[in-house]
Amino acid sequence: MDLEILEESESLTRVALKGRLDTAGVDRIETRLNAVLGGRKHALLDLSDVTFLSSLGIRMLISVAKMLDRRGQKLVLVAPRPLIDQALRHSSLDEIIPVAADVDGARMLLNS
Amino acid sequence: MSDAPFALAFPNDAASLAGARRKVQEHLEACGVDETALHAVDLVLEELGGNVLRYGYDGASGRPIHVEVWTAPGIVRVALTDDARPFDPTRHPEPARASSLREARIGGHGISLVRKFARSMRYRRDGEKNRIEVEVARSAG
């Protein structure tokens, strides 16, 4: 599991997660992700290279979204693969955290 | 489904569960099982195996968990057996659906996810053992 900062502007941070968001993956990345998204900025989380999402990954995403929400900021998930998208829908996560097909769509959701 | 299953046993720690998941994936890849079924079986082991690790043994270590996997036309079946405290995941309630992020509970999605990616999930208590059998579709089609 790896994390890469793709973009950092005054109003948002765009981060790519890469690998498997399972128990070991969340262990490896959660503290760093919280630190990277620790400012007063919106966050776009690129999931296009995430190949597995378990309940602990879902827990981490909800936790990050809540942390941002407490600061008046939004989290948008971007470009999940089909099986990951299915897991987001099966857990109804897509009803509480917006999901966009691409970065442009994510920016539109932030501005809506 | 009469062939002998691919079977292995591992102790109840996270590294051993991860190793067992890798071996099961390698076996199923060699059987030509598609990505959707590989994902579903891996999710079953991560979630149900992870639950046994976290809650089953009250901190005791070195306890065995058995995995068996069968492939058949149209189906992959995976069974997990442990001698942890009785726990029937088929009776575990679905998490409440949150209407907003603020209301959402952070955890509790594991068994629900397994249910949704699986065709069926059965549980029985055999003496001192829990046995969970999950069937997943062998291909997305």
Image (cartoon, coloured by chain):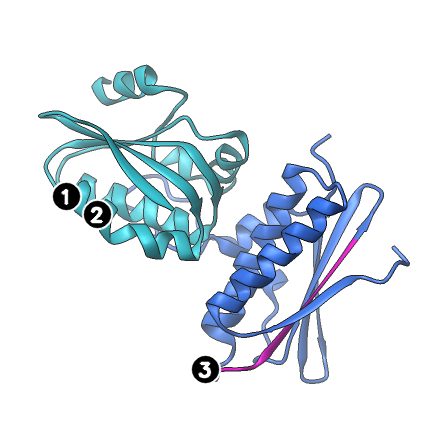
Residue found at x 73% / y 42%? B33
Task: Report if the CB atoms under discs 1 and 2 are less than 8 Å apart.
Answer: yes
Chain that is coloured cyan in the picture: A
Which residue is label 1 attached to?
Answer: A38
Residue B100, percent from left and from top:
31, 39
Q: Residues within 10 Å of mark 1 (few under 14, many from 20)?
A: some
Q: Tell me the chain of label 1.
A: A
How far apart are labels 3 and 1 at the CA level?
35 Å
Q: Residues within 10 Å of mark 2 (few under 14, many from 20)?
A: some
Give the colour in which the image draws chain B: blue
Which is nearer the eye, B103 or B35? B35
SS category of the residue bearing label 3: loop
Q: Which residues are magenta?
A: B60-70
Residue B58 numbered tag: 3
- On the rendered image, what quadrant is the N terminus of chain B found in? bottom right
Q: Is residue A31 magenta?
A: no
Residue A77, percent from left and from top:
35, 31
Which residue is label 2 attached to?
Answer: A34
Q: Tell me the chain of label 2.
A: A
SS category of the residue bearing label 1: loop
Residue found at x 59% / y 63%? B89
Same subunit, labels 3 and 2: the answer reads no
Residue A79, percent from left and from top:
41, 26
